[in-house]
Image (cartoon, rainbow, N blue to C red):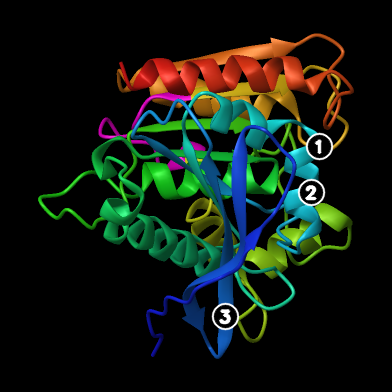
Amino acid sequence: MVSFIFTTACVVSASNPHYNQQEDVVYHQAHGVALVADIFTPKKNLNGHAVVVIASGGWSSDRGKIRDLNRAGLFEELCGRGFHVFAIRPGSVSRFSAQDMKSHIEEGIRWVKRHASDYAINSNTLALFGASAGGHLASLVAVTNPPTDSDLDASVAAVGVFFPPTDFLDYGGRLLDPRKAGRINQSLRSLAFRETNGDLTDRQVREQSMAISPARLVNKQAPPFLVIHGDADPLVPLQQSKVLVTALKAVDVQAKLIIKKGGTHPWPTIREEVIVMANWLLNQQQ
C-alpha cells in the first residue's frame, strides 16, 4: 500500500525576480520511498493557473533534472506569465517501471488538485509539461486519464512536450526488443519488463511495449498537445513526435508539432522554444 503524505519544505531565498521556490515537498510515498516536488510560486502577475512539470531525463529524476529545466529558462518563463509550477520527480528507472512512474505522476496531479485552494489555482485548467523521458511520461499520463466526474482525477487540460519517445513498437523504423542487447532495448526492458520472469514471448513484448507507448493509446478525450522536436535529434527520432501528433489529429484532438531545424537533444537556443511553449500554455487558459 502507498500513503498520501504532505510535508512542509523551506522556501529557498533565491534572487530570481519571477518566483519563490520550495524544495523537496513530499507529494506521495511508494514502497517506502518519498516522492518529492519543487514548487515555484510566481512573485507577480498570478494568473490562477498551474503547470505540473515532470522532472525526468533518461527516466531518472534526480535533482539535476530540476537544474536542467532551470537552465532552459522553463521556471522563469512560466512563473513570469503567472503560472504556479509544480516540478514533480516521479522516481527513477533504477527502481521503478514506466507504469510505476506513471502512477506516481497521477498521484502528483491529484495532490496538486487537492491543494489547489492553498495556492489559489484552478484545478480544472491544470497543464502538464515534460521533455525527453519527462515528455514520454507526460504524454502517457495525458492520453490514459480522460476527464471524469471526479474533481480529483488525474486528467489535465493541456500538454506541452519536447522530443518525447512515444512509440516503442516503431522507434524511428526500428522494432525494439528487450530480449536483445543495446542501450535502447535494455531501457525498454527496464521500463516495461522489470517484473517479468523467464523468457519473454513475442506477444508479451508487443503488449507490454504498447502499454507504455502513448502514440498507440491516443483517444478522442485526450487534451490539446504542443510538441516541439529537433530534426537532428540523435537520441529520440523526430518520427516519435510525428506519430504522436498524427494519432492525435486522427481522432480530432488539437495537436501541433513544431520542428526545430538543426535541433539536437536539446539545442543551445532552446529557450526560444520554451518561450513559445509558455505562451501556448498561457493561451490555452483563455
Check disc 2: other Cα within 10 Å, few if <14, some if 14-19, many if 20+: few
Name the quadrant containing residue 18: top right
Within the magenta stretch, is there residue 239? no
Residue 282 position (above or below residue 33): above
**Tag count in the figure?**
3
CA–CA distance between discs 1 and 2? 6 Å
Q: Position of residue 32 (x, y in %)?
A: 55, 91
Per the rendered image, the range of residues in magenta is 215-225
Within the magenta stretch, is there residue 218? yes
Q: Amino acid at mark 1?
A: Arg
Q: Nearer the viewer, residue 210 or 146?
A: 146
- For label 3, the SS is strand
Name the residue tied to disc 2.
Answer: 67
Q: Position of residue 159 (x, y in %)?
A: 46, 33
Q: Amino acid at mark 2?
A: Arg
Q: Residue at x 40, y 65 (%)?
A: 107
Check disc 1: other Cα within 10 Å, few if <14, some if 14-19, many if 20+: few
Q: Residue at x 30, y 18 (%)?
A: 252
- For label 2, the SS is helix
Q: Nearer the viewer, residue 95 or 281?
A: 281
Residue 107 position (above or below residue 269): below
- For label 1, the SS is helix
Q: Residue at x 82, y 63 (%)?
A: 180
Residue 78 position (above or below residue 186): above
Name the quadrant containing residue 115: bottom left
Disc assigned to residue 71: 1
Judged left or right of residue 65, residue 148 is: left
Q: Amino acid at mark 3?
A: Ala
Q: Residue at x 80, y 53 (%)?
A: 184
Q: Position of residue 41 (x, y in %)?
A: 52, 44
Question: In the rendered image, which quarter contains the N terminus?
Answer: bottom left
Name the residue tied to disc 3.
Answer: 34
